[in-house]
Image (cartoon, helix red, strand yellow):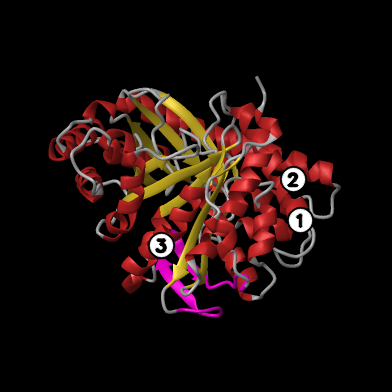
Amino acid sequence: MLNQKEILSTIEMIAQQHLDIRTITMGISLLDCADPSASRACWKLYDKITRHAERLVATGEEIEREFGIPIVNKRISVTPVALVAAPGDSDNYAPYAAALDRAAFATGVNFIGGFSALVHKGMTRADECLIRSIPEALSTTERVCASVNIGSTRSGINMDAVSLMGNVITETARATADRDGFGCAKLVVFCNAVEDNPFMAGAFHGTGEAEKVINVGVSGPGVVRHAIEAVRGAPFDVLAETVKKTAFRITRVGQLVAQEASRRLDTPFGIVDLSLAPTPAVGDSVARILEEMGLEVCGTHGTTAALALLNDAVKKGGVMASSSVGGLSGAFIPVSEDEGMIAAARAGVLCLDKLEAMTCVCSVGLDMIAVPGDTPPETIAAIIADEAAVGMVNQKTTAVRLLPAPGKSVGDTIEFGGLLGTAPVMPVHKESSAAFIRRGGRIPAPLQSLRN
């Protein structure tokens, strides 16, 4: 039971500190939609998605009204489409993306994820067809998100896929050049991708999941920052304890919403993902949390240590609040979506190399980072390889969501609006990585993969 103090505290978190449920995501298995006829498969997946998710948005809105808890997004994740399309008679998978987009519009969700392929050890014909279809798929749809898993701790890094993704990201940026390369904001390259992630653009419904499931993503950087203001100057153990207790309270709100959505939609409850996912709004920034710990500007010396403390304390608090914490859970550092990160990047304090170091200790990786439009595909591939190596060796999920900005260079800005925010174009190293990427093959799994 919640006491009066806890209820008032939760109301304050929602009203004044930007606490929200970032997403209710319904995962739906499409394995039974596979068909030798691509057109029939597209019809099947549209029909199944719209049947299962027809009440998702309305239910989320009902819970918002009744509980007074903002639910920012309602989303759908599906089985990686490369698996569903494999028996089909087409080499172009853009029609599958179009069917997903129609289903997203029909159900009213913000995004649908799962135009995905899992190629960490090798590519099937279907995997390669899907990957090569990504530029067309993302440039001709509005709500479809794509992801490709190119490495894992157990299998190593598929460098052929890494090289291909460098080209795909470049082509996707060109195909959406009229929107500052917006297609790339819907494309993530993973190492150690998880099957129950409710956050876009990397969400997909894993093959080990149930027929359908409800996953919830909670946010609340503003709540955490407010809490640590009260212990300004206190020792680090006090700071960590404060973050942990705050994360516990945030997760309990997510657990409540997840269980209620599960009951009303008659769908099994999967996980609560406690990720401090920022927005461009002032007061809702992970960077500002790190600065409240004592850093003058996010990105200066000490930033990685501060982020390590934050990420660990958030996870400890979350797992005490729910037995179903999953997904990515921790702290996200998407540059364009975080007001403090944007400011630090513009000031020249936060750079790509520092962001890479920070990804060693936080959730996911190099996220929503704009780079010059003339960045070579081999350089983009090398950045992906670096980040995948961080994930592979540290046995954690890492990802890259780069935004090559067509026609723009360092100092310029791209504007997406909404949650996707504003991205200052950041410099990359000019020295070539082309010969390294051209080697191809696979970087072997590290010694820590031998855990049997």
Residue visible at 71% across and 56% down in the picture: 290
Left or right: 41 as drawn, with respect to 436: left
Q: Amino acid at mark 3?
A: Gly
**Residue 410 visible in rendering:** yes
Left or right: 214 as drawn, with respect to 365: left
Return the residue at label 2.
309
Element at label 2: helix
Quarter of the picture holding the C terminus: top right
Instruction: Read off the magenta span.
Output: 408-430
Residue 384: % across, % down: 55, 54
Q: Amino acid at mark 2?
A: Leu
Element at label 1: loop
CA separation in Å, label 1 and label 2: 10 Å
Return the residue at label 3.
418
Q: Are marks 1 and 2 in contact (CB under 8 Å)?
A: yes
Element at label 3: helix
Return the residue at label 1.
293
Residue 402: % across, % down: 50, 61
Q: Reading the chain from its start, which is encountered first: label 2 or label 3? A: 2
Residue 414 painted magenta: yes
Residue 8 painted magenta: no
